[in-house]
Amino acid sequence: MTEKKKLKDKKVDKAGDMSFPASDAPGHSSATGTEPPARPVDRKAPIITNEDIEKAQRGEGHKRRDRK
């Protein structure tokens, strides 16, 4: 392979890498699905306080099931 051909192949490979994956939608676009969402779109994540974290670390706040 000549140096000119190697350089051209390298440029083509780099251009392909920069466009990969071309099938992914841009991250800034809106949802494109046609089905309604499985949960309400206005649903917010729960607010977790330091106290909640400390309780979880101690094992409090969880319902324990008796194992059979």
Image (cartoon, grey):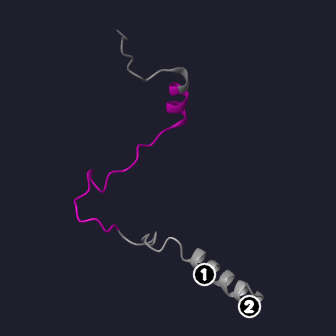
Secondary element at image label 2: helix
The residue located at (34%, 67%) in the rendering is 31
Q: Is the magenta stretch mostly helix, strand or loop?
A: loop
Q: Quadrant of the N terminus?
A: bottom right
Instruction: Please tell me how crowded label 1 is: few (under 14), some (14-19), or many (20+) other residues with Cα within 10 Å.
Output: few
Residue reaching furthest to the top: 68
Q: Please state the horizontal and vertical placement of residue 11, each as a whole percent of the image.
A: 66, 84
The residue located at (23%, 65%) in the rendering is 34
49 or 44, nearer to the observer: 44
The residue located at (28%, 65%) in the rendering is 33
Question: In the image, is residue 30 above or below residue 68?
Answer: below
Q: Please state the horizontal and vertical placement of residue 49, each as a whole percent of the image.
A: 51, 37
Secondary element at image label 1: helix
Relative horizontal placement of residue 63, taking residue 36 as reference (left or right) = right
- Membership of 62 in magenta stretch: no
Q: In which quarter of the image is residue 63?
A: top left
In whole angstroms, how far apart are the C-alphas of marks 2 and 1? 17 Å
Q: In which quarter of the image is residue 68?
A: top left
Magenta region, residue range: 31-56
55 or 26, nearer to the observer: 26
For marks 2 and 1 on the same chain, the one whose residue lies earlier in the sequence: 2
The amino acid beneath tag 1 is Ala
The residue located at (68%, 87%) in the rendering is 8
In this figure, which residue is indicated by the disc labeled 1? 15
Question: In the image, is residue 2 above or below residue 59?
Answer: below
Q: Please state the horizontal and vertical placement of residue 39, each as a whole percent of the image.
A: 27, 50
In this figure, which residue is indicated by the disc labeled 2? 4
The amino acid beneath tag 2 is Lys
